[in-house]
Amino acid sequence: MNLNPNKMFRLDGRVALVTGSSKGLGKAIAIGLGQAGAKVALNYFNNQSAAEQAFSEFKAAGCEGALFRANVVDENDVQRMFAEIKQTLGPVDIIVVNATPAQPLKPIEEYDWDFYQSMLDFFIKSPFLLTRAALPHMKSQRWGRIINITSEVFQLGVSPFTAYVAAKGGQTGFSRSLARELAPFGITVNMIAPGWIPVERHENDPQDMKDAYLATVPAGRWGVPQDLVGATVYYASEASSFVTGQTISVTGGHTVH
């Protein structure tokens, strides 16, 4: 392990995949990993124009990587994407599981099981599929980084939000168990739990709801996507080689109890 502080956070020679990186948190994370030296696979599924704009910003920041379209809840699509990444950039060393669907707050009576299932697909099935696809390479080199973007909602029990909170709780449990399972192979599994960081999908959220949340943030400001970059680079780098199964809360103190 290189203890030079100028190098221990560098990701040169690594290939990182960031799911859902066409906008918001994922775009900032992809750029941050690229600026730390990784070759980055930016993933999107629905919005090609947003993905192309994100990739343009990524390249303008001096980063190296490529854009890959895939549905991360579909096993065949995940396998195809990993094969394409390997051919284009090299095998995946670092995964950041970030892709997310819409997240409406509703009383439990207004949800149906199909919606619950969509949450489980994104936050349990997708991490499972991505991890399985990456493990042959990670285990063979005895090095890997799996980073799940979870949420403060699980810690806080936010309501009325049962579908999303339950799925994020499942993702957290999956990550904690997986961390123990993969530690002997030099593979770490960690979590980043952001607070409410307004991105594109929050543009139409009620202002009174935003004001009420911000009033409870000890840091006195909104988080921005770039606030997740430091934690992600740390988890992805040699600096965190003895850290696994852990959660960094990026909330401006909102989850301090």
Image (cartoon, grey):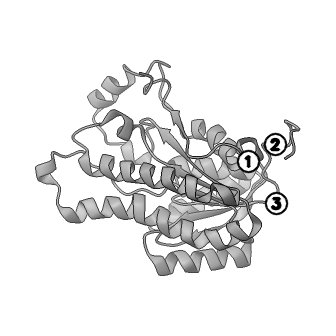
Q: In the rendered structure, which amino acid carries the disc numbered 1?
A: Ser
What residue is at 49 percent from the left and 70 percent from the top? 129
- Real-space Cα separation, disc 2 to disc 1, in angstroms: 7 Å
Tally of marks: 3
Instruction: Tell me the SS state at disc 1.
Output: loop
Q: In the rendered structure, which amino acid carries the disc numbered 3?
A: Gly
- Real-space Cα separation, disc 1 to disc 3, in angstroms: 11 Å
Quarter of the image where one finds residue 112: bottom left
Q: At which x and y percent is residue 82?
A: 61, 74
Q: Are marks 2 and 1 in contact (CB under 8 Å)?
A: yes
Quarter of the image where one finds residue 86: bottom right
Q: At which x and y percent is residue 140?
A: 73, 71
Task: Determine which residue is flagged by label 3.
Answer: 13
Is residue 145 found left or right of 223 in the rendered image? right
Q: Which mark's residue is nearer the viewer, 1 or 3?
A: 1
Q: Are marks 2 and 3 in contact (CB under 8 Å)?
A: no
Where residue 237 is drawn, which disc sits there? 1
Sequence order check, earlier mark of 2 and 3:
2
Quarter of the image where one finds residue 8: top right
Task: Determine which residue is flagged by label 2.
Answer: 8
